[in-house]
Amino acid sequence: MFARHSNPLVGWKPDFSPPPIDQAIEKDCHDYIQTLPPKERQFVGPIDFFEDTSGQHAVEITIGLNGTNWGHVLIYDKDGKRIKVIKYISGHSRS
């Protein structure tokens, strides 16, 4: 899904606990990145981890491409299963 609106992670808090994600989420995140076109994979980073009050987790992958920063947000349920992907413009930079 592509969204042209505000950050879908508003209200979520950063997850800095060691490790910030379980191995299933880490593997899924890596697999997701591998499905991206080669040009997008080249500009992946940073990758940030979040959690909400219900125990769900999210991973935001930022990709800077042609002056536009794209946020790819992968949302996981409490069991670590991906339930949603949101792609949105998170900002712009000079090219």
Image: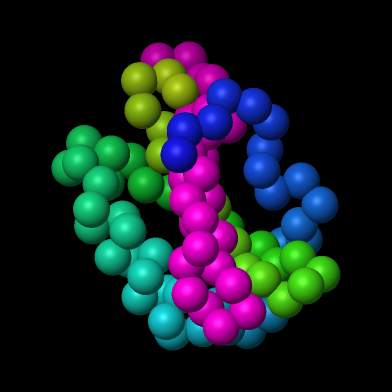
Residue 83 or residue 61, whichever sits in front:
83
- Residue 41 is situated, as x and y percent measured from the top left of the image, at 27, 46
Q: Is residue 13 left or right of residue 39?
A: right
In the image, residue 13 above or below residue 10: below
Numbered marks: total: 0
Q: Is residue 17 left or right of residue 19?
A: right
Q: Place residue 90 in its image quadrant.
A: top right
Q: Place residue 75 in its image quadrant.
A: bottom right
Outermost residue toward the top? Answer: 94
Q: Image point 63% across, 84% down: which residue? A: 18
Q: Looking at the image, can residue 62 be seen?
A: no
Q: Is residue 23 left or right of residue 73?
A: left
Any magenta on residue 82? yes
In the image, residue 86 above or below residue 28: above
Q: Place residue 33 in its image quadrant.
A: bottom left
Any magenta on residue 54? no
Q: Image point 69% across, 80% down: which residue? A: 17
Magenta-colored span: 69-95
Q: Quadrant of the C terminus?
A: top left
